[in-house]
Image: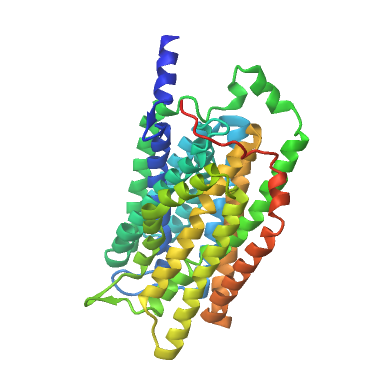
Amino acid sequence: MGGNLIDQHVSKKELFGHPAGLYVLFLTEMWERFSYYGMRAILVLYLVSETTGENHGLGWTNAEALQLYGWYTMLVYFMSIPGGFIADKYLGQKKSVLIGGIILTAGHAILAYEEVWAFYTGLLLIISGVGMLKPNISTMVGGLYQKGDIRRDQGFTIFYIGINVGAFLAAIIVGYVGENIGWHYGFGLAGIGMALGLLVYYFGQPYLEHVGNFIGNSKSAKDKEALKKPLTRIEKDRMIVLFISFLLVIIFWGAYEQAGGLLNLYALEKTDRHFLGWVVPASWFQSLAAFFIIVIGTAVAKFWAKRKLKGKKASSIFKMLTGLIVMGTGFLFMSAASIQYENSGSSAMYWLVLAYLFHTLGELSVSPVALSFITKLAPVRYASIMMGIYFAMTGLGNKLAGLLGESASNYGEFTIFTGIAVFCISFGLVVMLFMKKLEKLTHGAEDNEHVIEE
């Protein structure tokens, strides 16, 4: 009995104004994203590299590489649906994250081998591992906070900063190793990152004692009843809002994920990367969004929290629509870059920097907010599977991004960049006309939010 009380005290300990378990999940996700984004930063570049030379690749065309990239990133996130289902019905989030981490580590380790079978086997294992880990670790973050705690959105932003610390380090370190030492050394380095994340998660369990446990093993009569009863009208309305928000998610990521594909190739082929007599590696531009999130992430979260506490418009729907419009605006800088390239044969690096800055501002108002929104609205018994559906919609967005990137070879970058900007801005403004109706369907899930300390 005493041991349980000690575990509960440890699990609910706070650090920097948030549950200590948040930082265990922060570090776990940081290393998982180091592995994922490290691999993403060099995947397309590896595929299009010539088959001859010291650091040879597979010699694919840009269109072929972007097609595989689109399928890969879509499947990575689509596997979150079975991953969430398994957690909700059989294992709970905590065990599912552990299993996912083990599968991911194995996948990255296999990618280090220079064999075709290893390449495809590694990709399949990574797809499966992310599916088990991604939706469930995000759901666990929500479980750290009580209902109505305004710190929940900020907690997801802190967690999101962890994602981007990993992404930033990955683009710099794995990108450099992959481009300059060897693609497979880069893949292997990404695997070491995932192994570190697995160790952090394993030894951080005392701080996660009350989070992510399988509800089917609960001794609470209320929990057992929740597993069987049908959805109430309020729960159904909230689910409708979530599914509508998922449409916004598809559009957002369809535009945003040009980063790993079309923008990555644009940096490689059409951007003047000379800086003080040195050529900036193309993969390093992948670190910009992550860098900006690390620098301004908490400021954006505090901005929205202060608006909420002052009674100003700051619902999750409003934040996400604002984020979509701001991100779309960022593509106008790439339209300008395309014009400059057409006129002079190259475009300046600052266009990419400005585009990534606006994309980041938009992302901070969409992605961590959407994760938090799901944990507020989804019924507990469907929490992980709804998170899985969210990531599947992210996957659809990734696939859409690949298709848009491929179409650039037919329509040209200027048309694609400008079209994305106009559509995202227009869509965001139109949906804002229906915002009050959507907010009404949440039935006050975000009303009366305030700081709740343990």
Q: Is residue 111 visible?
A: no
Residue nearest the observer in this picture, 432 or 222? 432
The residue depicted at 72 percent of the width and 56 percent of the height is 434
Q: Left or right of 180: which side holds 318?
A: right
Q: Left or right of 181: which side holds 373?
A: right
Residue nearest the observer in this picture, 175 or 143? 143
Q: Judge whether 9 appears above or below 419 on screen.
A: above
Name the outermost residue toward the top. Answer: 1
Task: Indicate the position of residue 168 as horizontal and vertical percent values.
Answer: 36, 56
Task: Indicate the position of residue 212 as horizontal and vertical percent values.
Answer: 52, 31
Q: Judge whether 340 appears above or below 334 on screen.
A: below
Task: Indicate the position of residue 358 as horizontal and vertical percent values.
Answer: 47, 64
The residue depicted at 44 percent of the width and 28 percent of the height is 208
Name the outermost residue toward the bottom. Answer: 343
Residue nearest the observer in this picture, 77 or 444? 444
Q: Is residue 98 visible?
A: yes
Q: Quadrant of residue 412?
A: bottom right
The residue depicted at 57 percent of the width and 41 percent of the height is 83
Task: Indicate the position of residue 320 as horizontal and vertical percent values.
Answer: 58, 54
Q: Quadrant of residue 278?
A: bottom left
